[in-house]
Amino acid sequence: MKPLYTLHGLSYRYGGRRAVDHVDLSFEAGRMTSVVGPNGAGKSTLMGVMAGVLEGYEGGCRFEGREIAAWNRRELAARVAFIPQTLRLEFPFTAEQVVFMGRTPHGRGLFETEADRAAVERALALTDSQQFIGRAFGELSGGEKQRVVLASALAQEPEALLLDEPTTFLDLKHQLDLYGLLRKLAGEGVAVVAVTHDLNLAAAYSDRLVAMACGQVVADGAPSEVLRADVVEKYFGARVQVIETAAGRPWAVYG
């Protein structure tokens, strides 16, 4: 299958420091990939470049065969949804209005269409966010905001979904619900790429793990190939024992 994303020699600098350093990766439709690594590994920067948010990268970052830098912002947003770690809105929008913002790249006029409404209602249902629609976004808790922002991304009906630490403010139930949903979306053909610090959650739900350190890819493969005791100790600085779950997935036991 031809990949949606192809990264070749991709680098990105902050001043004189390379936050991403000659990365070669590809991401296919219908697969869920988790990008893991310690703080400062370059994970968030990688997502920013892939989303078209960070300009001035070096090397190649192609989506559907075209350099990210060559895409019109609206055209790209109709195909790629990006959820950053934090979202700041300056105006008092309701949660429902925030979700409808996800339809903006598809807009053909000033008024919502039946397709817009259907996409928003499905996104709200998938994220268990219907109860928030009339509330001001700024008054929601961190976890509630995260679910609404995810709903907005799903309302875009993207081909690729990029997420940076999507479970940060979620309780355990909604963390599991989110990863189950991401798994479902991948099964429907979406290319899902999620940055996370939770190695076990990533290994339990992902088709593939990409481990980064110091801006470079240091391990890439199936969860059983990446979540290994030697990899965790070398790049995460933690000693673990890796066992196999009943589902055949690796699980790191700390302590």
Image (cartoon, rainbow, N blue to C red):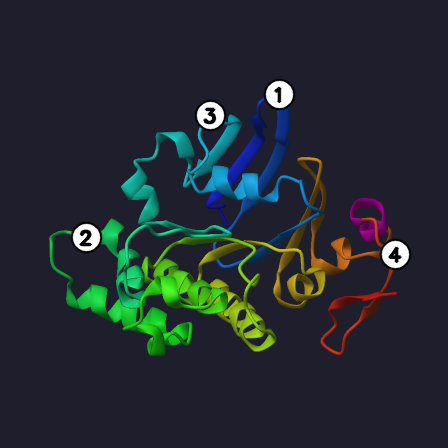
Q: Which residue is mark 3?
A: 56
Characterize the local packing of mark 3: few (<14), some (14-19) or many (20 or more) Cα atoms within 10 angstroms: few
* Mark 2 or 4, nearer chain start: 2
The magenta stretch spans residue 153:
no
* Mark 1 or 4, nearer chain start: 1
Towards the viewer: 132 or 43: 132
Residue 107, numbered circle? 2
* Mark 2 or 3, nearer chain start: 3
Give the left or right position of residue 108, taking residue 246 as reference. Answer: left
Characterize the local packing of mark 4: few (<14), some (14-19) or many (20 or more) Cα atoms within 10 angstroms: some
State which quarter of the image contains the C terminus: bottom right
Name the residue rendered at 57%, 31% in the picture.
Answer: 8
Residue 16, numbered circle? 1
In terms of secondary structure, where does tag 4 sit?
Answer: loop
| Cα separation between marks 2 and 4 | 51 Å
Pointers 2 and 3 in contact (CB under 8 A)? no
Residue 239, numbered circle? 4
Give the left or right position of residue 14, taking residue 141 as reference. Answer: right
Query: What amino acid does circle 3 point to?
Result: Gly
Task: Name the front one of labels 1 and 3.
Answer: 1
Query: What amino acid does circle 4 point to?
Result: Arg
